[in-house]
Image: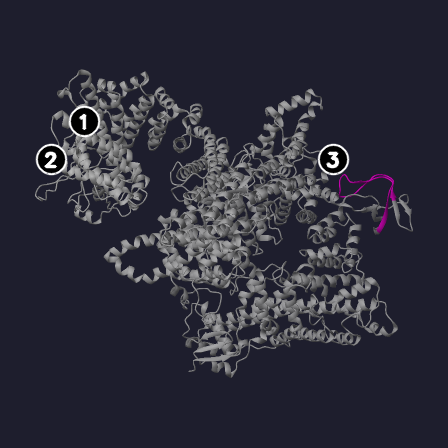
Amino acid sequence: MANTNSVDSSLWWDPFSLLLTELENASLSSDLPPYLVKKLKENRAWFVNTLSFFRPPNAKSREALHSRELKIGSHLLNIRPELKDQALEISSFLYLDEVQSYIIVERAAEKSNLAFDSMLQELVHVILLEYYIERQCLLKCTRRILIHALSLENGSKDGNNIGEEALGLISEGLESKIISVLQDLLASSHPDQMDVDLFTLWAEETLIEDNLILDILFLAYYESFCTCNGERWKKLCFLYKGILSGSYNFEKLTVSTEAYRSSYQAKIQLLLILIETLDLENLLQLVHDEMPWRQGASPFSLVDIQEMDSIISSFNAFETKEAGPLILTWAVFLCLISSLPRKEENDVIMDFDHVGYVRQAFEAASLSSFLEILQSDIFSESDGPVAGYRSVLRTFISAFIASYEISLQLEDSTLNLILDFLCKVYRGEESLCMQFWDRESFVDGPIRCLLCNLEGEFPFRTMELIRLLSSLCEGNWPAECVYNFLDKSVGISSLFEITSNSLVDDVSQIVETHVPFHIPGIEGLLIPSNTRGHILKIVGGNTALVRWEYTHSGVLVLLMRLAQELYVDSSEEVLLTLDLLFRMVSFNTAVCFAMMDIGSSLHIHTTGMNGQMESSMWVVEIICTLVRKLSPNSRNAAVMSLGINTLAKMLKCSPSNVAAVTLKANIFDVPLKMSVLDAGSYGSSSGSWLLSGKLAKMLLIDCEQNDNDCPLTISVLEFTIQLMETGFENDAVLALVVFSLQYVLVNHQYWKYKVKHTRWRITLKVLELIRKGIMITSYSEKLGEIIRDMLLCDSSIHNTLFRIVCTTSQALEKLYTSRLFDLVEIEGLTVAICSVLDILFNMLSKFSKDMSSSLPIFLQSVISSGIKPIPVVAAIVSLISYFRNPAIQIGAAKVLSMLLMLADVLQQCLNGSSFGIDDKQITELRHSVSYILLQQSVGQEDLFVAIVNLLTSAACYQPAFFVAVFSTQENLDVRPNNASGVMLPGDEVSLKAVDSKKSSLVDALLGFVVDSDDIINSNPRVLFSILNFFKALWQRASQYTSFLDSLKSSEKFWRQLSNFILLTSGVDNPSVENLTEMEALNLAYRYRCQSVIMEIMAYDMFLQKKLLDVEPLAKQAPESRDRVENSISTKKSNATNLCDQRNILSSWFRTSVLDNLIKSLASYDYDNESYFLAKVAASLVTVHVIGKLAAGDSGSLSISSLEKINTLSNKLRSHPAFSELLLQYSKRGYSEGKELNNLVLSDLYYQLQGELEGRKISSGPFKELSQYLVESRVLQAYHKYDIDPFVTAKDLYLFDLVHVRAELGLDLWDHSKWKTSKAIVERMLKYMQDANSMVLLANSKLSALKALTNVIIIFENDSLGQQTATKEKSSDQIVLSCIDHICRCFRATVESLTPFMGASTDTFHFLTAQAELLLHLMQSRHKSVTLSICILVLKTSGSGLKVLTDFRPSVDEVNNTLNLLLLLLLSTVEFSCLNSQFGGIFDVESVEDIAKFSNVCLGLLPVLCNRIATAEHCTLALTIVDLILRSFLTPNTWFPIVQNHLQLQYVIMKLQDKNSFSSISIIMKFFLTLARVREGAEMLLNSGFLSSLRLLFSESLGDTPFMLTNNKGSLSISSEKIEKPQQIWGLGLAVITAMVQSLGDGSSCVDFLDNVIPYLFCEKAYMISYYLSAPDFPSDDHDKKRPRAQRTPSSLTTLKETEHTLMLMCVLAKHWNSWVKAMKEMDSHLREQSIHLLAFISRGTQRVGESPSATVPLLCPPVLKEEFEYCKKPSFINSRNGWFALVPLGCVSKQKFPAVSTTTALIIRSRATENAQHASQTYFSDEVALQIYRITFLLLKFLCLQAEGASRRAEEVGYVDLAHFPELPMPEILHGLQDQAIAIVTELCAANKLKQIPKQVQNICCLLLQIMEMALYLELCVLQICGIRPVLGRVEDFSKAVKQLIRATEGHAFLKGSVKSLKHIISFVYPGLLQTEELM
C-alpha cells in the first residue's frame, strides 16, 4: 500500500452547509464581507457546474483510496480502512466518485453514533442523507447569491461584490449548465438494490433538487441576469410537456406526500418560468404606449412564435389539466400581440387563433387552476423567490384583464374568481402593492381600472371592494393610499326608484332626487334633496343603481355600517371591514390616528372615564362593543381577533384614551370587583386569573376551526403586551397577564390546531410577553412583582420553558431529516429556543441579586438533573454545538456564562467539577468551542465574543469546570470517535492541512492578539473580550500555570500588548459631542483594553515577584526540592519573558510613552454641565408635556408617564415658588386668572430653554422651580449598563433612552398633533446620549487610569529590578512632567465641579484616581522633586480640599477623595522637609521657593483645621498640620490661625473616643507641638487637657498597678496592656514636659506642677518605676544545671518611653521647690532605680577585638514595620565599641517575613552563639544603642540635678547633711560609662580623621562627651563627699584613654567646646593629670 497518493483537487469541497449558514446570516441590505466573497470566489467552479461536479466513479480514484494518505490539493486525508470499504460500496450505490464517497462517509461518521463494521441500512440512510444535504446546500448557495445580488439597494448588480459574483456565474454559463443538470435529473433513475425507504428518500431529495434548480433558473430570467430566446423557451416547454405527459421520472418519484408536494411545486415553477419568459410586461408596455410590434422588440421572432404556437397547440387542457394555465397565458400573449398597431407584413399574427385557446382554457377552468397555484404551499412554505412568482401571476392577470376587457358586467363567479386571484397575488407582497398605487406602473393599470369600477358601486357593492382594498393595503404607503382612496370617495351609489320626475336626462342617464333620500342599509346617511346622480345600470323594472354626486368619506360609511352590525350576529362584511381597518392601522400609524379622529367630524357625543374622553374614541367604542357582544363561534373568533388587534394598534397610538375605553367596556369579562392583588399571592388558585370562560373557549374555537392570518390567541397576547407597556396596572391588565402566563403559556402546547404552524406563532408571542414582562419589572411595582413571583416560583411555567429548551443539537439536526416535521415548524422551534434562552439569561441576571439564602424554585429547576428529557445545563451545553443557528449558540453561551457566574450561590447544589455534565458533553463542548474560535471567528463576532466570555466566566468562577472542559492540548487534539456523538459541523474531519496540528484555545486567542496589529482600533470589542479572558487566567494563576506558560512562551505577546498601548496612548480623541454612539462605545472599549493590558502586566509582575520570594523557601523543603529542580527551565523561560516585559515597561518610563499615557488618561472628559443640561432638557420636555396635558391632549404618552407627570404637575402648581409667581402675575395684571397657570408654565418653559442655550436662570422663583424639576427626575429613567460583565465594581447606570422613547411614544409623534414638539424631545435625547457617552468613557478611562497606577507601583517596587535599577528607573524629567500634567488635569476636574449643577459620583472617583496616581509619582520621586514641584502639588491638592470641603453630594465619594488629598498633602510636606534646608539633605534651592511654600501652607491651615473637626479626616489633617507647624512656620504666624480655626475642645474629646484609639498618638504629637509654644500650652491648660489626659491614662493603663514580679524580682507588664501604655504614656509625658518648659516659672506653672507631680509620682508611680527598671544583665555562668528564667525582651519603643519619663523627671527636678514639696521622700526610690539602670548600661563595655559575650545583654528585636526596614539598612555609626557592638546580638529577628503588627510582642530566646555568628550592625542596632545613650544622658542629668540641689541646700545651711544627701552611683559605674564614651568617640574620630564626619556621628560624639563630663562630675561629688581619692590603677588607665581621646579629637572643630569643658572637669577629678600627660 502506497503511503501517499494525489488526486484532482476539484474532487474536494468544503462543507456547503456551513457556507450556506454564513450566507443566510449575512444581511441582504448590505454587501458581503470580504472573507465571504473570498469563499465564493474559491467555490465559483462548484456554483457554475453545480451538481455535475459530483463526479461518477473512476479507476484512478478507486486506486487512490488504497493508499494510507490521500492528497487533494492542499488537503490531506488519512484513509481509515473501515471507512474506505464503506466508501467503495457507497460509490457504486450512489454512482459517485470513490474519493468523494469517502469524504461523504467520513463526514457522516462525524455526525453518527453508528459503528462502521457492516453495511447497515441505517448507516446507508445517514450517508445518503449527508450526500443530498451537501448537493442541496450547494444549490441553495447559488440561489442565495442571486437573491442577495437582487436585494441590494436599487437592484444594481454592478459596483458590489455580490453583484459581480452573480454576473460572473451567468457569464460562465450557469444558465445552460443548470438546464443540463435539470434534464439529467428528470432522466435519472434510482440506484439498484434500493429498498422502499431508501427509494422514498432518494425520490424526495431528487425532487427537492429539481425545485432548487428551477428557483435558480427563474431568478436568472426574472431579474434579467440572462434572456430566454425562442430556442431556450421551446426547450423548456418541451420539458414541461414531457413532465405532464409522463415522459420523465416525475410520476415515478411521487411516492410520498412530501414527494408529491415537491413534484407539484416543480411543475408550477416551470410553468411560471415559461410565463415569465413570454415577457408579458413588455407587451403591456407596448399596448400602453400604442407602439407597434417589431422584430427585435421581443426576444422571440415571428418564426419562434409560430413554432411556439405549434407546441402549444399540441397541449390539450381537457386531457391534462396542468396545461390549461399555459394555454390561457399563450392566448393572452397572442391577444396582446394582435392588438398592437402593425404593418401589413405582420398580418401573419392574425392567423393565430387566440380566441380558441381562451375558449379551451375557460372550458377547462384554467383560471381556477391559477387560483389553485396561488393557494398552494409554494406561496406559503417555500423559501424560494415567492415575490417573483407572485409578480409573474400579477402580470398575467393584468394582461388577461387588459386583453379581454374584464368589467363588472361579467357574471359574479368569474368576477369573484378574478378578485380572489388578485387578493391572493397582492396580499402579503408590499412591493406589488406599491407598484399598484404607483400611477407610473402601467402593468397594474388594468387592475386599477377594475378597482375604480368597484368603487363606483360603493356602498351598494361593498364586500368586493373591501376585499380588494384589504389586499392592496400591504405596507406603509399602500395603506395610506387605500385610506385616501376611501376617504376621498367622490360619490355614493345606491338603488333608486326612477320616476318621470326624477329623470332629468334620458340620454345621459341623469336623475335627481327632490327630497332627502335615505341610503338603504346605512342609518342616518341621507342624500340631500336636489342631488343628481348617474344611472350605472338597471337592476329591474324602474329600479336602477345610481351614483350620486354627493361626496362622503368611504371610511366613515364603512364605520357606520359596522356600527349598525353591533347587535346582529357578525356577517362576512363585518369580518372583511375589520380586516381592512386592522391592516390599514397596522401598516400606517398616521392612518391609525386619522381613524381615531374620524369621530370628531361627526360631533358624536360620548362620555368617557373621568370625564376626559374625547369623541375621537368613537371608533374604539364601536370595536369594543362589537367584541363584547360576540357569541362563541369560529367566525366571531376571527372577528374578535381582528377587533382586538385593531385595538392593540390604537392603544399604542393613544394609550390613556384607548385603555380607558377598552377597560371600561370590559371586553374580556373581568370581574372588576375583585382585584388580582387582593386575591393573595399570584397564586395557583382559581382566583389568580379572573377571566370568564368565554375567552378561553373562543381561543380554543379559533385554533381548532380557523386558519386566518391573525389567530385570536396572538391578538390577545399582543393586546396584553401593549397594555403592559403602557404601565397601566389595572385589575384587568393584571388578570390578562396572569391568564397569559398560567393558562396560555402552560396549555397552548396541548391545543388542537387547524394550522399546525400556529402553535409556534403562539409560543413565540407568549415568550415575547415574558421577555417584555421581565423588562417591565424594573419600572413597574405591582405588575413587576407578580411577574417576578410567577417566573421564579411557578413550576408549570418552568416546565413549559424547559420543554422547549431542553433538547440537544443532535435532536435538532435530526428534525431536518424527519418527515414528521417541516421547515416552518423547525424554524419555529429554533426561534422559540432562542427566546427561552434569552428569558433564562434575563431571569438569571435580573433576579439573581434578589435571591435569598434559599434557592427559588426556578433556580433549583435549572440546576436539577431530574428535568426531562435532559437537564437544563446539559441542554444548554449541547446547544452551543448547534451551528445551524448562531443565535442559539450565543444565547446558550450567555446562559451558561451566567450560571457559572452564579456558581458561588449554586455551589452547594452542584455535582462535581464539571457543573453536572458528563464526559461526552464536556468533549462536545470542548470541540464546539474550539471550532468557533479557530474557524468561525472572522464572521461571527457576537458568537465569538459570547464564547470568549463563556471561557472568562468559567476561568473566573469555576476553575474546576474550566480545567475539566478545556484542560490540555492532548484532549483538545483528540477527535471524537464514533461513539461520542459529538455534532461538529463537518469541518476538516481527519484531514491534515499544512498546519495539521491544531492550536489550543489559548493559542487560538493568542493568535488574535499577536497577528492583528490594528485590532484595538478595528475591533476593540473582540480584543477586550480576549484580554479579559487572559486577565482571568492571571487572577487565578496558581490554577492555570500551563495556560499562562503557553501565553508567555510567545515571543510577541508582551510586545504586542505594548504595541496596543502605543497605538492608542498618543492619539487625540474627538470630543464627546462629535462622537456617535458606536464611536463612543468603541473608544470606551479601547480604554478598557488599555486597562486590561496594564492589569495583566501588573498581575504578572506581582506573580513573578512572589514566586521568586517563595523559591528559596521551597528549595529548603526536602519534598519540594525535586520539583523546584525540575521546573528550572520553566522558570528561566518565565524570567526571560518577565525580563522582556520589564524592558518594555522600562522603555515606557524612559520615553514619552508614560507621558502620553498620562496625558491621555489623566484628563477628565466628563462635563458636569452637560450632565446637568441633560436633566434641564428633561425638565423642559416635562413642562412642555404638562402644558399639552393641560389642554386635554395626552398624545401617545404611556399611562405610567402620564400619572407621573400629572403628579408632578400638581406638586409643581402647589410649590411656594409657583404660588409666588401666580401672585406676582395677578398683581401685575398679566392675564385673567384662569390663564395664569399656563402663563407661568410658558415662562418657565422659556426660562429652561434659555438655560439650555447658555442663559443662566437668575435667583428667584423660576430658579427654585427649575431646581425642583431637575431633582424630580421625571423622564430621567436609568438602566444598568454592562460593558464588562466581569467587573465587580459599582454598577454603571446610564439614561435609558429606549425606555424614555417608549414612555413618551416618541416614534408616533410624527403622525399626531405632537409632531411639532418632537424636536424638543430629540434635543433632550441628544443631551442624554452625550451624557451617556461621557459616563461610559469616563468609567472606562477611570479603569485604565487605575490600572496604570497599579503598573507603576508594582514596577517600581519590584525587587526583580533592583540589580538594574539605575538602567530601568524612569526618567525624572518625564515623571516630573507627568506630575505637572496631572496637577493641571486635577485642577480642571475640580473646576468642573459646580454645586448648583450637582456632580456625578464618577467625578469624585476620577478625582480619587488622579490624586492616587499623583501621590505615587510623588512618592517614587521624593528625593528628586524640587520645591517648586512640591508647591505645585500643594496648591493642587489644596484647591481640591477647598472645593470639596463645601461640596457634599455623596458623603462616601467625597470622603474617599478628601482622604487621598490629605495623604497627598502629607507626602508633599514630608518630601519638602527632606529636600529643603529643614531636612538638612540638600541646600536651599531658593529663598523665594521656601517663602512660597510657607505661604501656601499658611493658606491651607484654615481648611485643614476645618478637616480636623471631621471624624473621617481628623487624624490625617492633624498629622499634616503638626508637620507644617514644626517644619515650615514660626509660631507667631501659625498660632493666630490655629487659635481662630481649630476646635481644640473637639480634638481633646477625641482622646476619650474608644473608636479612635489609633489616632491618639497623632493627637498627642500635635499637642506636643502646640505645647512648645507658651500660648499653646496655656490653651491646652485652659481646655482641660490634664483632666482628659488623666482620664485617658485611667482607661488605658488602669487605676491599679498591673506590674508582675518574676522569679528574678524584675518588673514586667501583662501582655494585654503592654502595648497601649507605651506610646500613650510616653507622649503624654512629653506633652507635660513641653508645657512645663513653655509655661516657665509663673504661677500657672506652679499650680500645674502641684497637680502633675503628685499624680504621676504617686498615683502612677508604678509606671515611672516600670520604665526606670533595669533589666538583668546576663551572667556568663555556663552552669547548665541551673535553670534560667526566660527573659522578657525590650523594644525600641520601650526605650523611647523611658527617655520621655526621664526627660520629665529632669524638667520637674529643675523646679526644685515644687519637686521637693511634692516628692518629699519619694525621690530616693527614683534615684535608686536610676542608679541601677546606669549600672546596667555601664556594664555594656565592649572593646574592639574582644570576642562577643556568650550571652546577649539586651534582647531588643524589631517589632514595628519601620524597624524591620531599619534592619535592612547598613549601620550609620560603624562603631565596634560599647553598646554599638553589644546591641546587634539582641536585635536579630527570626521572622523571615515579619508581620506589620505593632501589638504583638516578639520573644527571642537567648541563643547567643548563633546570634553572634549572624548578628551584624544595622541602622536599627545603631538606633537602639543611641537610645541607650540618650537614656544614659538623662539619667546622669537627673542625678546631677539632684546633687546640684543638695549642694545648694548645703551652701544655704553651711554644712553637708550626709544623712539626706542624695544617693549617687558608685565610681565603678561611672568609670564604665566614661570608658564607653572614650572608646566610641576615639574610634569614630580616628576613623574619620581625613574626612568630614557626618552630622549624625557628630551628634553622637557630642552626646557621649557630655555623658563623660557628667559622669566625671558625679564621680567628683562621690570622691569629695566620701573623702576618697581615685584608685591608682584607674588613674593610669584613664590617663591613657584620655590621651588617645584628645589626640583623636584634634582637627574636629565641632568637638572643641566639648573637649574644653571635659578638660575642665578632669582637672578637678584628676588634678595634675592633664599637665602630666601634656594635654592642657
Q: CA distance from mark 1 to mark 2?
A: 29 Å
Q: Is residue 895 in sight in this rendering? A: no
Which amino acid does the dot numbered 1 rest on? Arg
Which amino acid does the dot numbered 2 rest on? Leu
Q: Range of the magenta residues? A: 512-536
* Badge count: 3
Query: From the viewer's perspective, is the residue at label 1 or at label 2 nearer?
Result: 2
Q: Which residue is mark 1?
A: 1727
SS type, badge 3? loop
Query: From the viewer's perspective, is the residue at label 2 or at label 3 nearer?
Result: 2
Where 330 sits versus 1611, above or below?
A: below
Where 1209 sits versus 670, above or below?
A: above
In the image, 1723 versus 638, the foreground residue is 1723
SS type, badge 1? helix
Q: Which residue is mark 3?
A: 603
Between discs 1 and 3, the one toward the N terminus:
3
Q: Which residue is mark 2?
A: 1928
Q: CA distance from mark 1 to mark 3?
A: 116 Å
Q: CA distance from mark 2 to mark 3?
A: 138 Å
Q: Is residue 1508 left or right of 1169 when viewed as pictured? A: left
Query: x and y percent of residue 918 in the render?
Result: 38, 59
Label 2: few (<14), some (14–19) or many (≥20) C-alpha neighbours in 10 Å:
few
Label 1: few (<14), some (14–19) or many (≥20) C-alpha neighbours in 10 Å:
many
Q: Quadrant of the C terminus?
A: top left
Query: x and y percent of residue 1690 in the render?
Result: 22, 37
Between discs 2 and 3, the one toward the N terminus:
3
Q: Quadrant of the N terminus?
A: bottom left
